[in-house]
Image (cartoon, helix red, strand yellow):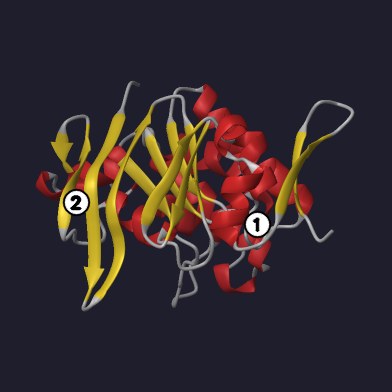
């Protein structure tokens, strides 16, 4: 399952506002790429552009050499799955029905097996008969991720997947994301928590005012100077006795 997503010098504008400016990146199988930056940096816009959901004003996005604009919706849905920040469900679908929506690009004899496996992996099988609206926000997030897993794509694009989760749920959720990487899938995730990115990402991309200001290994890229400049807050990186890097605000 070797898949390669490439964004080349992409730009996105809305009216007179430039949301992305000359951003390039790649995501390959076996990578978890974290997109970081302050609010308004263009992170969600970038994810939408990579997914093929936002029109570009410049540049291109391709999957395995094929521009996403040339792919049919079904082909694109078989290549990448998208987890939005929020999923609006107006009708009283059950949890299992929501997860089953991930199989719509495929609809084959394997569907029920993959639906069940996705629900088990996200620990939502016991909720299968509940309607989506009756769930807590954390449960909704896990069900939404189960839908993405059921879609069974080589690329997954996750927009702030842990924003509404408590610390335990966050750890389990990102452990699932890393296990997908270990299976050979490519994952790109918009994250706010810098320490989570430091721990789980194989590579980070830092956006600031719509431009990519740094990209590479998190231990190398995430420095005191860069983060302090991007977030307009003094930040220091310290090391625990176990050798783990921890990013902290520096109010001294």
Quarter of the image for the N terminus: give it: top left
Give how far across and how far down residue 156 sits, in percent: 42, 42
Give how far across and how far down residue 93 sits, in percent: 48, 67
Give how far across and how far down residue 147 sits, in percent: 47, 50
Question: Residue 175, relative to residue 94: is it above or below?
Answer: above
Let me know if residue 172 appears in the view: yes
Q: Residues within 10 Å of mark 2 (few under 14, many from 20)?
A: few
Q: Which residue is mark 2?
A: 73
Give how far across and how far down residue 226 sits, in percent: 57, 47
Comparing 72 with 160, the one in front is 160
Q: Secondary structure at mark 2?
A: helix
74 sits to left or right of 148: left
Comparing 17 with 177, the one in front is 17
Q: Which residue is mark 1?
A: 127
Q: Residues within 10 Å of mark 1 (few under 14, many from 20)?
A: some
Q: Residue sitting at 28 percent across and 57 percent down?
A: 21
Q: Residue sitting at 13 percent across and 50 percent down?
A: 69
Q: Secondary structure at mark 1?
A: helix
């Amino acid at each position: 399952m070797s898949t390669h997503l490439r964004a080349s010098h992409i730009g996105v504008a809305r009216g007179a506002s430039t949301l992305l400016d000359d951003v390039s990146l790649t995501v390959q199988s076996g990578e978890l790429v974290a997109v970081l930056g302050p609010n308004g940096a263009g992170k969600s816009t970038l994810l939408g552009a990579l997914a093929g959901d936002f029109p570009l004003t410049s540049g291109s996005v391709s999957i395995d050499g094929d521009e996403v604009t040339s792919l049919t919706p079904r082909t694109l849905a078989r290549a990448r799955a998208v987890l939005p920040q929020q999923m609006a469900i107006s009708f009283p679908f059950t949890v299992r029905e929501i997860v089953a929506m991930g199989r719509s690009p495929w609809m084959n004899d394997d569907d029920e097996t993959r639906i069940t496996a996705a629900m088990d992996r996200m620990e939502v099988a016991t909720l299968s008969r509940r309607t989506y609206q009756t769930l807590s926000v954390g449960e909704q997030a896990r069900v939404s991720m189960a839908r993405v897993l059921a879609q069974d794509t080589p690329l997954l694009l996750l927009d702030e997947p842990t924003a509404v989760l408590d610390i335990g749920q966050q750890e389990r959720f990102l452990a699932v994301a890393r296990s997908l990487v270990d299976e050979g899938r490519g994952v790109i995730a918009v994250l706010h928590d810098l320490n989570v990115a430091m721990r789980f990402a194989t590579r980070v991309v830092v956006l600031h005012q719509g431009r990519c200001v740094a990209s590479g290994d998190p231990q190398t890229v995430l420095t005191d100077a860069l983060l302090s400049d991007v977030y307009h807050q003094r930040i220091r990186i310290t090391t625990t006795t176990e050798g783990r890097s921890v990013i902290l605000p520096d109010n001294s």
